[in-house]
Amino acid sequence: MKFNVHRNQMLQKVQFINSIVPVRNPLQILTNILLEADSEKGTIRLAATDLEVSAVTEIGCDVIESGKIAIPAKNFTDIIRALPDDQIHCMLDNKMMNIKCRQSEFSLIFADPEDFPEIPDREWENSFLMNAELFSKLIEKTSFAVSEHIGRPAFSGILWELENTTQKMVATDGKRLSKYETTLKLDTDKIDIIMPIKGVNLVRRIIHDDVSEIKILPEESAISFEYDSYKIYSRLIEANYPDYEAVIPYDNSKVIEIEVEPFIKAIQRVSLLASEDNYKVVLNFKPNQLKIHSEDIDKGSAEEVLDIESSIEKFQIGFNYKYLIEILNLIDTDVVKMKFENALDPCLFYNIEYPEDQQNLFLLMPLRLASD
């Protein structure tokens, strides 16, 4: 193996592939990147897998001699990152990977590539194309609500439903929920799958303005994405997603509209003295006024008053301020619409307006108040 490649060209691809590599794994080979140089194609192929998510990318460069190795992902990435912005010269020498750039030289031990799990290419005939920016937006607006706990497998991914001209993405951890719905026409069969969060977040990372469409291949137990020079393969979560529509209180009767930016800043200030046990801030509403309050037995208390347009009589509700700010930061309009019912019922958050073909909502469960 022998090739020359520019450092910046290599770094972007290596850092992406390295993000898949598990930090610790009983299968030592998985801590490597599979690197394959092809002199006929003039490409380097980089691949990594954690057995749940796999990714492959190619770099066009000057390949003098073909070859394949499994190279330690962390060491290789750290070396490429540390090198100056110039040509890198790589070759195998005495069972070591020799890496040179200007006056720097590294010799890196590598593993047998035959021990690396096979990552076969897919048959893409049944794939379809989707607007990449829209797909990225759907993930952005839902992924925050995915559960970090593995006890409920369905909650550890994003539900994707697609039928006729309607598609929905939904995520929830039982405390938060996000649903994003769009109207569009795709040339594909009905889709009803749960996508692991790691795979779809990787897809978001590679989407950029230069390529407008992403190729998607849903299969029985996996989903594959092809975008630009990247291919990502992810196993699906095999579980039954709960009836999320049953918990969304569309008929909440108390409706308030608040400017997002001053609302967020006020919460951030008041949260400085919120309890670290539950991160609770309390919203006290009365006609044309909102008072935000927090307190902690060991730190003290804080409050701030905002003037708002509201005819709601006295009403208070408590939230985890971290979750609340997270949702408010995902609102696309200057004003957020909030729909309440009672202090213990879920609250809904909406943009004040939406594009004609899109609609989304956020749901947040309140925290119990001392008076409840």
Image (cartoon, rainbow, N blue to C red):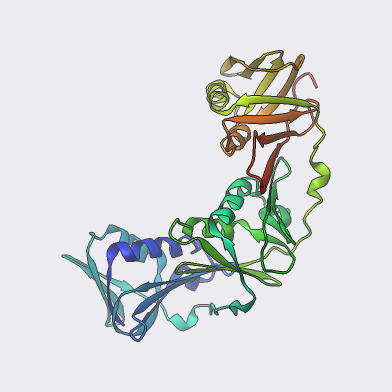
Drawn side of residue 234 relative to residue 175, left or right? left
Outermost residue on the left side: it is 103
Q: Is residue 211 above or below residue 126?
A: above
- Give residue 186's position: percent from left, percent from top: 66, 64
Q: Quadrant of residue 277?
A: top right
| Residue depicted at x 80% and y 46% | 245
- Give residue 318's position: percent from left, percent from top: 70, 25
Q: Is residue 367 visible?
A: no
Q: Quadrant of residue 236?
A: bottom right
| Residue depicted at x 53% and y 65% | 25
Q: Is residue 165 above or below residue 55?
A: above
- Give residue 76's position: percent from left, percent from top: 35, 66
Drawn side of residue 22 relative to residue 292, left or right? left
Q: Quadrant of residue 302?
A: top right
Q: Is residue 209 visible?
A: yes
Looking at the picture, tell me which residue is in the foreground, 262 or 120: 262
Looking at the picture, tell me which residue is in the foreground, 55 or 73: 55
